[in-house]
């Protein structure tokens, strides 16, 4: 039987990014990709974009090791909105205002502020090398890569910027983020052979030097109301192209995030709210083997 059977969870969201937080620091056993898919089941499950599973910390000074599952059962190295949800949950229980966590992408710091209802996550430094993102072939300049969909002489979307924020992102620069059928193009681009580990696909419109609007198709989760790491990736990619400042406000379908690509250490700071919805326990029937 799965370690998640009857286990407590919290349903939260990070400006509309659907998040389930499970604290397994006192539990034996772990979570498998099958468990993660079962939780997302339409029959008695909890609809989510990411499942954040907290396990016992592996290093002194860290609060937990966090595994991040997409609803298709795949694992992600980073989830900005999910981290704010975890942070809020822990801080409300312990009274802490700052903490360090470990994910597959490394250590990250988070704190409450700059206002009481806001949480800031240090998402680390972006990576731009084609092997780091990763891409399937060499591109010396990842500010724009050769990739397009639609007719060769009149592409619908083309020349994205690519960046890793602990997970792979492609950002297509457009005039109107709502003018494209992202549910149709998202899966094609997510699974394009140029992305050996698939990619999160974002449409971004630069409003001015301080404001950008985005919509994202998430790798392993689909269309979302918000993707924090995509907001970070977009801010970095826009600043790299010298089209925005290093500190911008990103508008997503679910709300706004403040992103700062800090000069002194190259780290990207993401600030936004986190919303608690309800608590529950997973129905053991979700994890029963198929008859
Ligand atoms: N919603 C997240 C990103 C989730 C991970 C992504 N789907 C992946 O597999 O890379 C965020 O807020 O950053």
Image (cartoon, grey):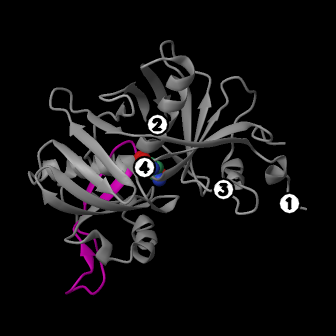
Q: Secondary structure at mark 2?
A: helix
Q: Compare residues 268 and 95 and report the one nearer the observer.
A: 95
Residue 47 in picture, x, y percent from top left: 62, 56
Alpha carbon distance from label 4 to label 3: 19 Å
* Residue matched to label 2: 83
Residue at 10% x, 52% y is 209
Q: Quadrant of the C terminus?
A: bottom right
Mark 4 or mark 3, which has the lower sequence index?
Answer: 4
196 relative to 10, above or below = below
Which residue is the extreme one toward the top? 60
* Residue matched to label 3: 40
Mark 4 or mark 2, which has the lower sequence index?
Answer: 4
Residue 68 in picture, x, y percent from top left: 54, 42
Mark 3 or mark 2, which has the lower sequence index?
Answer: 3
- Mark number displayed over residue 169: none
- Mark number displayed over residue 290: 1
Mark 2 close to ligand 1, CB under 8 Å: yes
Residue at 65% x, 25% y is 25
Q: Quadrant of residue 31?
A: top right
The residue range painted magenta reads 146-170
* Residue matched to label 4: 15
Task: State whether residue 140 appears in this view.
Answer: no
């Amino acid at each position: 039987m799965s370690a998640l059977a009857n286990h407590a969870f919290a349903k939260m969201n990070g400006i509309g990014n659907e998040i389930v937080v499970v604290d397994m620091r006192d539990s034996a056993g772990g979570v498998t990709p099958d468990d993660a898919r079962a939780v997302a089941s339409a029959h008695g499950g909890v609809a989510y974009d990411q499942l954040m599973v907290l396990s016992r910390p592996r290093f002194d000074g860290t609060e937990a090791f966090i595994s991040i599952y997409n609803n298709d059962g795949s694992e992600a190295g980073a989830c900005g909105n999910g981290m704010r949800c975890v942070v809020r949950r822990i801080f409300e229980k312990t009274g802490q205002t700052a903490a360090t966590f470990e994910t597959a992408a490394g250590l990250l710091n988070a704190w409450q502020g700059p206002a009481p209802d806001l949480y800031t996550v240090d998402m680390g430094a972006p990576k731009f090398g084609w092997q780091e993102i990763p891409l399937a072939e060499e591109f010396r300049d990842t500010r724009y890569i050769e990739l397009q969909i639609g007719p060769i002489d009149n592409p619908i979307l083309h020349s994205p910027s690519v960046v890793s924020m602990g997970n792979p992102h492609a950002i297509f620069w457009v005039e109107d983020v709502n003018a494209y059928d992202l549910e149709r193009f998202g899966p094609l681009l997510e699974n394009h052979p140029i992305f050996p580990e698939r990619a999160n696909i974002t449409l971004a419109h630069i409003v001015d030097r301080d404001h950008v609007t985005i919509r994202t198709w998430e790798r392993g989760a689909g269309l979302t109301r918000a993707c924090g790491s995509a907001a970070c990736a977009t801010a970095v990619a826009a600043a790299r192209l010298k089209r925005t400042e290093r500190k911008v406000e990103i508008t997503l379908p679910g709300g706004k995030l403040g992103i700062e690509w800090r000069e002194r250490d190259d780290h990207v700071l993401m600030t936004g709210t986190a919303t608690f919805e309800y608590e529950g326990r997973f129905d053991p029937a979700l994890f029963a083997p198929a008859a």
